[in-house]
Amino acid sequence: MKNFSRASTGIDLNLIPVFIEVVRCGSMAKASVRLEMSRPAVSLALKRFTQLFAEPLFCRKGLYLEPTEKALALTRSLELLLADIHDEIGEMTAPDNNSPAQFVPENNHIMQQPEPSA
């Protein structure tokens, strides 16, 4: 199984929603309100995210940030991936999910058991 940890990939997945919201809002100030984060925190997160790419993701237009074509394409892809993740988790945690559950005492939570393979 591939290791997707931030230590091995250098990618902090927590930065993705910040990037998407800045693209949607066109402004770090508006994104900070919607994300309930401080403006400096949004700015730092966006800076860290954009450092992952060789080319700029935004062009400054006065007070606004205009996403590049690459940023728009990346946003569409990331939104689809995040939607899939939310759907998968939602299906697994739905009350009508009939998967057997196992209590894990050391963690004090219930863990879904994997379906047996045939």
Image: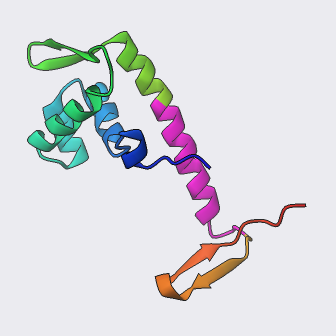
User: Does 30 sit left or right of 103 as displayed?
Assistant: left
Q: Is residue 85 magenta?
A: yes
**How far from the left and from the top, in percent, is residue 64?**
15, 19
* Residue lying at 63% horizontally and 70% vertically, measured from the top left: 95
**Relative height, residue 89 to residue 4 (above, below):** below
**Relative height, residue 98 to residue 11 (above, below):** below
User: Does 95 sit left or right of 41 as displayed?
Assistant: right
**How far from the left and from the top, in percent, is residue 101?**
67, 78
Residue 48 appears in which quarter of the rendering?
Answer: top left
Q: Nearer the viewer, residue 6 or 100?
A: 6
Q: Quadrant of the C terminus?
A: bottom right
**How far from the left and from the top, in percent, is residue 97?**
69, 67
**Relative height, residue 7 to residue 43 (above, below):** below
Q: Is residue 99 magenta?
A: no
Q: Which residues are magenta?
A: 78-97
Residue placed farthest to the right in the image? Answer: 118
